[in-house]
Image: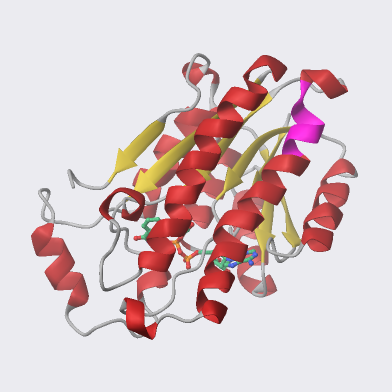
Amino acid sequence: MTLALVTGASRGIGRATSLLLARQGYCVAVNYLRNEAAASQVVEEIAAAGGSAFAVQADIADEQQVVAMFERLDRAGEPLSALVNNAGILFQQATLEQLDAERINRVLATNVTGSFLCCREAVKRMSHRHGGAGGAIVNVSSAAARLGSPGEYVDYAASKGAIDTMTTGLSLEVAGQGIRVNGVRPGFIYTDMHGDGGEPGRVDRVKASLPMQRGGQPQEVAEAIAWLLSDSASYVTGSFIDLSGGK
Ligand code: NAD
């Protein structure tokens, strides 16, 4: 058995991905920021289905906490073969004039710096150069990276654009070390991320604008992540799968 770390895994896309990876035979490290009870529930659900998992707390924007989280993984007894950089934040809709440095920096610290730090620690463990057996990383970007989210979340969209560039660059940097790095770009997915007081009627408006006329389910994103991590995608690196209903 090998280990898969999923960040921000107590709910939403991270939760669905953890459950799927456990069904596929990984021991899953379920990272969470604050909600220990929700992370424990994911772990219990995996155990009840005969899988293997444990919860691990860390704020991925904090370098020391990321290092400590990976040291905890080292003690799990299974080699790390998969990382899903899923944790991310999105604040309420705002125009350019409403953005301030604090908000922009918080978005970048979690979405970009956090993903970078987890990539660094994972690569140290997976790399052939350091005696590792190789591995795969999937970074969760967003359709926003392509669309820009004008007047709503340009800060968030820019952070996801940075994740795409990071994915491209790191895929090339570590390709010779037995590590594949890919990205997924979900569009509108039904998760709690949209539940925190957005514009009334936004969900219906967004749905109507999508060619498939519906949002996606976390499970539909999880399936693509699991495929990119799997040996079925053994010759795929530096690639992106759009899961956005055609937009
Ligand atoms: P979500 O809010 O349910 O999940 C995000 C998770 O990340 C939460 O559990 C949160 O606690 C965790 N998190 C936030 N900051 C963290 C930190 N500093 N350290 C550790 N964990 C942290 O939302 P989701 O929709 O499941 O989002 C998962 C990923 O998918 C995010 O990267 C998001 O940007 C991306 N995404 C979501 C959508 C969508 O429509 N839901 C669309 C495109 C991309």
**Quick check: 235 left or right of 33?**
left
- Point out residue 200 in the picture as x, y percentages from the top left corner: 21, 85
Up-down relation of residue 111 to residue 201 (above or below): above
The colour mode here is secondary structure
- Point out residue 6 in the picture as x, y percentages from the top left corner: 62, 49
**Quick check: 201 left or right of 91?**
left
- Is residue 159 inside the magenta stretch? no
Up-down relation of residue 168 to residue 111 (above or below): above
Residue 172 or 234: which is nearer the viewer? 172
**Quick check: 49 left or right of 54?**
left
- Point out residue 74 in the picture as x, y percentages from the top left corner: 87, 42
Q: Residue at x 41, y 71 (%)?
A: 192
Up-down relation of residue 97 to residue 247 (above or below): below
Residue 69 or 226: which is nearer the viewer? 69
Residue 65 or 212: which is nearer the viewer? 65
Judged by its main secondary structure, the magenta piece is helix
Can residue 76 be seen by looking at this rendering?
yes
Residue 235 or 44: which is nearer the viewer? 235
Q: Residue at x 60, y 63 (%)?
A: 110
Can residue 79 be seen by looking at this rendering?
no
- Point out residue 227 in the picture as x, y percentages from the top left corner: 46, 29
Q: Which residues are magenta?
A: 122-127
- Is residue 124 inside the magenta stretch? yes
Q: Quadrant of the N terminus?
A: top right
Q: Residue at x 30, y 48 (%)?
A: 146
